[in-house]
Image (tube, rainbow, N blue to C red):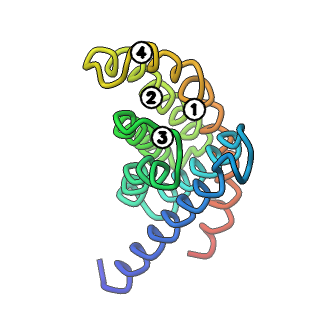
Amino acid sequence: MGNNHKLKYFTRTAILLALTVVFQFLGRPILLGPNSNFIVGPLVNACLVISSGLVGLFSGAVISVLAPYGAILTGAALPLPLAPFIALGNFALVLAFYIFRKKKIIGIVLGSIAKFAVIYGSLLYIIPFFKLLPENKAMALAGAAFGWPQLVTALIGGIIALPIIYRLERHI
C-alpha cells in the first residue's frame, strides 16, 4: 500500500468518523426531539456501511468501535458498560456487509440482523450475567432503544448507504 493510498484510506475513515460524531451530536433531544434515535441511528448505520463498502473492513471496524464512545461524549444516555456491546453489534453489521459486498442487499439484511442479535442478546444474557447494569435497567433498554429499533435503524441505514455507495464506487 503506497503512501498516497494510505493517506486516502485514513482521510476517508476520518471523514466518515467525523460525520458519525456530527450526526450523534445533532441527534441530542434538544436539537431533534425525543425520537431522534430514528434519525441518528440510520445516519450512523449508513456511515458504518459506507465505511465498510467503500474504504474497507478496518475502516468500518474503527468507526464501529469509536461510535458508541462518540455517542457518550456527545451526550447520549448510553450506559458506559453497554458501549463495548454496541461496538460489537456495529462490527457485526460492518463485517456482514463487507463479506457480502458483492451482494449488497444480502449484506445489509444479514448485517442488520446480526447487529440486532448481538446487542439484544448482550442485554438479555451477558450484561445481566456479569451484573454490568441492574437487571431491570438492562431489560428496559432491551425493550426500548436497544431492542428492535437497532434492527430497523440498521436496515434504514443500509438503504440510505446503498445509493451513496453505488454513486461513489464509480468515482473512487
Q: Quadrant of residue 56?
A: bottom left
- Is 13 on the left or on the right of 33, as rendered? left
Of helix, strand and loop, which one carries label 3?
helix
Q: Which corner quadrant of the image does residue 42 belong to?
A: top right
* Earlier sequence position, callout 1 versus callout 2: 2
Q: Which residue is mark 1?
A: 150
Residue at position x 58%, y 51% from top? 44
- Against 86, is 167 above or below? below
Q: Position of residue 70 (x, y in %)?
A: 45, 54
Between discs 3 and 2, the one toward the N terminus: 3
Residue at the (46%, 20%) spot, across then down: 137
Q: Give how far across and how far down residue 68 sits, in percent.
A: 44, 47
Dot 4 falls on a residue whose secondary structure is helix
Identity of the amino acid at label 1?
Gln
Q: CA distance from mark 2 to mark 4?
A: 9 Å
What SS does tag 2 mark?
helix
Labels 4, 3: front one: 4
Type of amino acid under label 3:
Leu
Q: Which mark is residue 124?
A: 4
Cβ atoms at labels 1 and 2 below 8 Å apart: yes
Disc 3 to disc 2, how far (Cα)? 11 Å
Give the side of residue 60 with respect to residue 38, left or right.
Answer: left
Q: Position of residue 58 (x, y in %)?
A: 35, 58
Residue 93: give its label.
Answer: 3
Q: What residue lies at 39% left-to-right and 34% top-to-bottom?
A: 82
Q: Looking at the picture, which amino acid does disc 2 mark?
A: Ile
Disc 2 crowd, CA 10 A, few/some/many (<14, 14-19, 20+): many
Looking at the image, is mark 3 or mark 1 earlier in the sequence? 3
The Cα–Cα distance between marks 1 and 2, rounded to whole angstroms, is 8 Å
24 and 95: which is toward the camera? 24
Question: Which residue is located at x 57 percent, y 64 percent?
Answer: 19
Q: Decide if residue 104 is on the left or right side of residue 38.
A: left
